[in-house]
Amino acid sequence: MVSLQEQFLKAGLVDKNKVKLANQDKSKQKKVERRTGTQSVDEARVAALETQRKNAERARELNAQRDAAANQKAIVAQIAQMVEKNRQSKGAGDIAYNFTHDNKIERLYVSAAVQAHLVAGRLVIVCLGGVSELVPRVIADKIAERDPALVVRVKQSSAVVEEDDPYAAFQIPDDLMW
């Protein structure tokens, strides 16, 4: 392999004296470095290393973003699969069951047995892709681990009455539909 100096000589860009002077300057600089124990800073090399470091950091960030997107896509696919495999029938829709999701009141028509299961907490509503599905509580807990915003929890009515509650004497009937 022919060195760069030899290529410049053949092309006529430099002459032998310039090559000789460049080699002498280089060897003088090395001698001075050895005597003083200091290293000369090669700006081009430092700039190249800095550029290489920045490129590697950017590549790591892009890989992390790509991995996060793939992870999110896998989670959505897992949730869809769990809902598809474990969804329950809503029964003959004669009772309107109202629930809140994303600060909106939504309605689902279910049978009396399904309503009892919803109120008891055995069935849970999962809103996926604009569609409300009923799944068992165990499956809803697994879905909530992955994305809690999709699961609609029914708040159990508490029998504990606060001491300073002015409406403690007025009981709310269990069959009240809102």
Image (tube, grey):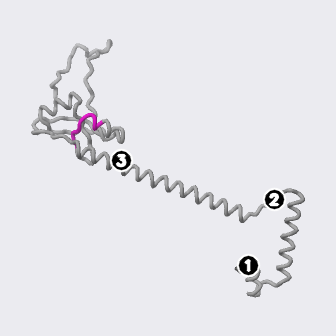
Q: CA distance from mark 2 to mark 1?
A: 25 Å
Horizontal side, residue 28 vs residue 77: left or right: right
Q: Quadrant of the N terminus?
A: bottom right
In terms of depth relative to the viewer, which is nearer, 174 or 22?
22
Q: CA distance from mark 3 to mark 2?
A: 54 Å
From the image, state whether disc 3 or disc 1 is nearer to you. 1
Position of residue 23 relative to residue 49, above or below, is: below
Position of residue 3 relative to residue 121, above or below, is: below
From the image, state whether disc 2 or disc 1 is nearer to you. 1
**Residue that carries the numbered disc 1 in the rendered image:** 3
Dividing the picture into quadrants, the one containing residue 111 is: top left
**Residue that carries the numbered disc 3 in the rendered image:** 75
Q: Which residues are magenta?
A: 132-140
Label 1 SS: loop
Position of residue 60 relative to residue 131, above or below, is: below
**Residue that carries the numbered disc 2 in the rendered image:** 39
Horizontal side, residue 21 vs residue 82: left or right: right
Q: Quadrant of the C terminus?
A: top left
Amino acid type of the residue that numbered disc 3 sits on in the rendered structure: Ile
User: Of the residues under marks 2 and 1, which one precedes in the sequence?
Assistant: 1
